[in-house]
Image (spheres, helix red, strand yellow):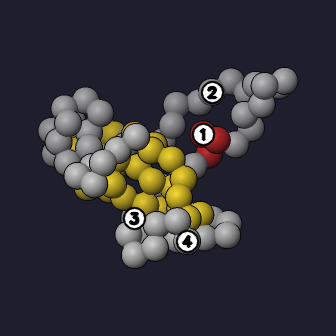
């Protein structure tokens, strides 16, 4: 999914030391961005195969010096036990 050169930012923990990871690059121009102190993960709530919720636009969570407010790409979840020393 990504290598050791991928600039990431982590948010959490939410439950059982789980952290959400985002790529710290602008999806429009590829520049490194300044991540917000916190990030909202509401886009994962309410998702269901049986009763899908109408998807809302995700909130921005970083600022690009060229493009302004953007949403960093979500990479996945990790835990402190899996990635000890990297968070």
- Residue located at (26% from left, 39% from top): 26
**Label disc, if present, on residue 37 of the rendered structure:** 3
Q: Say which label, 4 or 1, has the lower sequence index.
A: 1
Which of the 4 image quarters holds residue 60?
top left
Cα separation, mark 3 vs mark 4, equals 23 Å
Cα separation, mark 4 vs mark 1, equals 25 Å
Q: Say which label, 1 or 2, has the lower sequence index.
A: 1
Between circles 4 and 1, the one closer to the viewer is: 4
Position of residue 19 measured from the top left corner of the image (x, y, whole percent): 53, 62
**Label disc, if present, on residue 43 of the rendered structure:** 1
* Label 3 CA crowd tier, 10 Å (few <14, some 14–19, many 20+): few
Left or right: 70 with respect to 11? left
Q: Nearer the viewer, residue 79 or 63?
A: 79
**Label disc, if present, on residue 56 of the rendered structure:** none
Q: Nearer the viewer, residue 83 or 36?
A: 83
Position of residue 85 measured from the top left corner of the image (x, y, whole percent): 40, 75
70 up-or-down from 5: above or below: above
Cα separation, mark 3 vs mark 2, equals 24 Å
Q: Say which label, 1 or 3, has the lower sequence index.
A: 3
SS class, disc 2: loop
The residue pinned by badge 4 equals: 81
SS class, disc 4: loop
SS class, disc 3: loop
- Residue located at (54% from left, 53% from top): 77
Q: Are marks 1 and 2 in contact (CB under 8 Å)?
A: yes
The residue pinned by badge 2 equals: 55
* Label 1 CA crowd tier, 10 Å (few <14, some 14–19, many 20+): few
Position of residue 54 measured from the top left corner of the image (x, y, whole percent): 68, 24
Quadrant where the C terminus sits is: bottom left
């Amino acid at each position: 999914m990504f290598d050791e050169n991928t600039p990431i930012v982590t948010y959490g923990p939410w439950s059982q030391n789980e952290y959400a990871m985002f790529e710290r690059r602008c999806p429009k121009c590829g520049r490194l961005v300044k991540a917000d102190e916190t990030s909202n993960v509401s886009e994962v709530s309410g998702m269901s195969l049986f009763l899908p919720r109408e998807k809302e636009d995700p909130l921005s969570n970083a600022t690009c010096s060229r493009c302004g407010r953007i949403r960093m790409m979500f990479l996945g979840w990790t835990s402190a036990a899996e990635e000890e020393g990297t968070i």
